[in-house]
Image: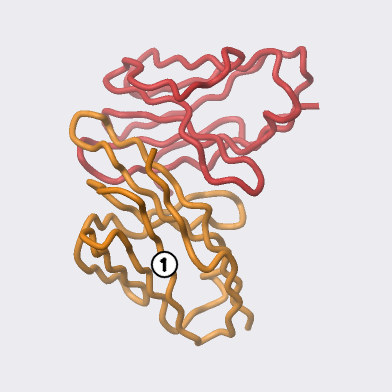
Chain colours: A orange, B red
């Protein structure tokens, strides 16, 4: 099956710093999503981004499908950004109802 | 708040117990999913239901039994679990061709 690798596995920042998280995938994908998991386990959708670039406030994401990677940018980080960031890809799509394969996540800690 | 609710939020059970996890959504989404998140591992897809029909069983042991009685509810019935089944169990839903929306999860501990 498809492989999803995220880097770095851990990231520690001071409040206000910028960061880039990377997601590499081993095969063509129909869809790609970025999630943030808070300390209580809730997964929050950040971006649904099979290709191109999207921005939402301090966060933006870019997926280059032909080169099989996606980047998540966090600018002016805040302590509330702490948690685990997951990339997940849907390699089936269409009528296969979205079987997501997750990466292992990047654990982000933002210190005040 | 994603519109997907899960109960209970925490569950402790013995290996001989039978329990059920519940997922509920009133978003009108067609597809519903169960995922398992163990410590130090990526989320693993367990089951997929579409229009109440099971379309995917990702080689899940038979001690986990899903049920989807209607388009708003998804259950995961548990029996004779093992300690290694302790994990966070997450439900997700998806409208056609869109992002998946996750519930808050049930944190399960098997003694």
Could you tell whether B107 is left or right of A82 in the image?
A: right
In the rendered image, residue A38, in percent from the top left (x then y), is placed at: 55, 57
Return the residue at label 1. Answer: A22
Q: Quadrant of the C terminus of chain B?
A: top right
Quadrant position of residue A58? bottom left
Residue at (36%, 29%) from the top-left corner?
B32
Task: Tell me if residue A7 comes above or below residue A102 in the rendering.
Answer: below
Foreground of the two, B49 or B23: B49
Measuring from the top left, give residue A33's x and y in whole percent: 34, 53
Q: Who is closer to the viewer here, A96 or A41?
A: A96
Q: Position of residue B22 (x, y in %)?
A: 52, 25
Secondary structure of the residue carrying numbered label 1: strand
Residue A15: % across, % down: 56, 84
Position of residue A24 relative to residue B108, above or below, is below
Q: Would residue B29 appear left or right of A109 to someone viewing this image? A: left
At a point 57% along the width and 12% down the height, the residue shown is B62
B18 lies left or right of B77:
right
- Which chain's residue wears label 1? A
Tell me what residue is drawn at x 39 percent, y 50 percent: A88
Category of crowding for the residue at label 1, using alpha-carbon neighbours closer than 10 angstroms: few (below 14), some (14–19), many (at least 20): many
Q: How many marks?
A: 1
Relative vertical location of residue A105 with respect to residue B52 in this rendering, above or below: below
């Amino acid at each position: 099956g498809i492989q999803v690798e995220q880097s770095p596995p851990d990231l520690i920042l001071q409040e206000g710093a910028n960061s880039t998280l990377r997601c590499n995938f081993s095969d063509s994908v129909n869809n790609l999503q970025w999630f943030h998991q808070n300390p209580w386990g809730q997964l929050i959708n950040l971006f649904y981004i099979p290709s191109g670039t999207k921005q939402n406030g301090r966060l933006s994401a870019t997926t280059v499908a032909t080169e099989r990677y996606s980047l998540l940018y966090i600018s002016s980080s805040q302590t509330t950004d702490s948690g685990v960031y997951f990339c997940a890809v849907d390699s089936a799509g269409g009528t296969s109802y979205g079987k997501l394969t997750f990466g292992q996540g990047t654990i982000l800690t933002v210190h005040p | 708040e994603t519109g997907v609710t899960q109960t209970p939020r925490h569950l402790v059970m013995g290996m001989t117990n039978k329990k059920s996890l519940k997922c509920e959504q009133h978003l009108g989404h067609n597809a519903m999913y169960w995922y398992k998140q163990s410590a130090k591992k990526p989320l693993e897809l367990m089951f997929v239901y579409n229009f109440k029909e099971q379309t995917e069983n990702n080689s899940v042991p038979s001690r986990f039994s899903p049920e989807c009685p209607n388009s708003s509810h998804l259950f995961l019935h548990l029996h004779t679990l093992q300690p290694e089944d302790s994990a966070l169990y997450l439900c997700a839903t998806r409208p056609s061709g869109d992002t998946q929306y996750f519930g808050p999860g049930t944190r399960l501990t098997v003694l």
